[in-house]
Image (spheres, grey):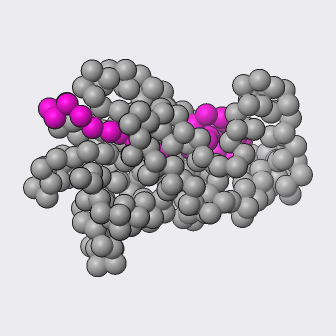
């Protein structure tokens, strides 16, 4: 019997692609969007309203969800966005909002559904993080920090949920061709002259990464395999360069830092 899967942020990007794939394979798929009325007619699965930044929305969504389903097998935390910009130039409020959505929104939705998973003594939580939740590249300080926070939260939570047979996994993609970059928020804080040259270089390096990004198929395939696995791994980096990136960071840190600095200086 195919599982019932909830996917947050299912109106675009990884969420939409995964929702369509699982629906076509016979899964019962429930997706979420802040504006489901815009997309409901164009998707074959049920799309419910959910705003991660709104506690009332999370509460009403949770109540509505279980009027459509009786049992939930998998929660896929996918909704979120990216803030780019030099750390010192990024207004604190912009960084705070990044955490409100990417970290606190993910935590609140997860916590809202944990009582149901605990009651049925089974479940699976798969959270789409990022390779920047494991490393810290320039121009992505707040996005990286929010993903590091998500990684840390679920690292601890997996132990607390073990006795309830609730499995926890993270997916950490490198750059992939989705609408993440298009929907990103670029810091509009006051420009600091000292960063003028570096800002130009790092923006060029970021754009180069976006332009050369891989097709998203590997991420969708990885999540599908996690859902089907008897004993899914906790950490699942995805992308052609992830192995090398993590190896260098962990075992050759000077070489890793040098490669980051070089990539920025040669991009512009």
Using residue 92 as the reference point, say whether residue 156 is left or right of it.
Answer: left
On whether residue 126 falls in the magenta region, the answer is: yes
Q: Is residue 182 visible?
A: yes
Using residue 230 as the reference point, say whether residue 151 is left or right of it.
Answer: right
Q: Which residues are magenta?
A: 118-143
Q: Quadrant of residue 125?
A: top left
Q: Toward the viewer: 265 or 129?
A: 129
Answer above or below: position of 34 versus 235: below
Q: Quadrant of the C terminus?
A: bottom right
Q: Quadrant of residue 262?
A: top right
Residue 83 percent across, percent down from the top left: 56, 50
What's the residue at 66%, 60% (across, down)?
214
Residue 10 percent across, percent down from the top left: 37, 61
What's the residue at 24%, 66% (across, down)?
46
Q: Toward the viewer: 184 or 36?
A: 36
Using residue 140 as the reference point, say whether residue 44 is left or right of it.
Answer: left
Residue 71 percent across, percent down from the top left: 16, 47
Q: How many marks?
A: 0
Using residue 82 as the reference point, say whether residue 80 is left or right of it.
Answer: left
Q: Is residue 196 visible?
A: no
Residue 261 percent across, percent down from the top left: 84, 40
On whether residue 2 falls in the magenta region, the answer is: no
Q: Quadrant of residue 21?
A: bottom left
Q: Toward the viewer: 8 or 125?
A: 125
């Amino acid at each position: 019997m195919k599982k019932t899967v909830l996917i947050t942020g299912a109106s675009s990007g990884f969420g939409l692609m995964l929702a369509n794939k699982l629906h076509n394979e016979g899964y019962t798929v429930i997706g979420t969007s802040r504006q489901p009325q815009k997309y409901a007619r164009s998707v074959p699965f049920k799309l419910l309203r959910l705003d991660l930044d709104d506690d009332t929305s999370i509460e009403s969504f949770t109540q509505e969800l279980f009027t459509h389903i009786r049992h939930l097998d998998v929660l896929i935390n996918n909704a979120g966005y990216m803030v780019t910009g030099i750390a010192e130039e990024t207004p604190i409020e912009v960084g705070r909002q990044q955490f409100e959505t990417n970290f606190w929104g993910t935590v609140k939705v997860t916590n809202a559904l944990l009582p149901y998973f605990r009651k049925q003594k089974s479940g699976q939580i798969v959270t789409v993080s990022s390779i920047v939740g494991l490393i810290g590249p320039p121009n992505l300080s707040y996005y990286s920090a929010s993903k590091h926070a998500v990684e840390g939260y679920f690292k601890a939570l997996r132990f607390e949920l073990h006795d309830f047979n609730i499995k926890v996994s993270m997916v950490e993609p490198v750059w992939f061709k989705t609408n993440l970059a298009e929907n990103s928020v670029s810091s509009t804080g006051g420009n600091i002259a000292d960063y003028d040259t570096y800002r130009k270089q790092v923006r060029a390096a970021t754009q180069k990464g976006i332009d050369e990004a891989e097709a998203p198929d590997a991420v969708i395939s990885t999540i599908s395999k996690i859902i089907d696995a008897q004993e899914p791994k906790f950490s699942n980096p995805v992308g052609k360069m992830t192995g090398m990136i993590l190896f260098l960071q962990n075992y050759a840190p000077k070489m890793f830092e040098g490669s980051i600095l070089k990539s920025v200086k040669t991009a512009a």
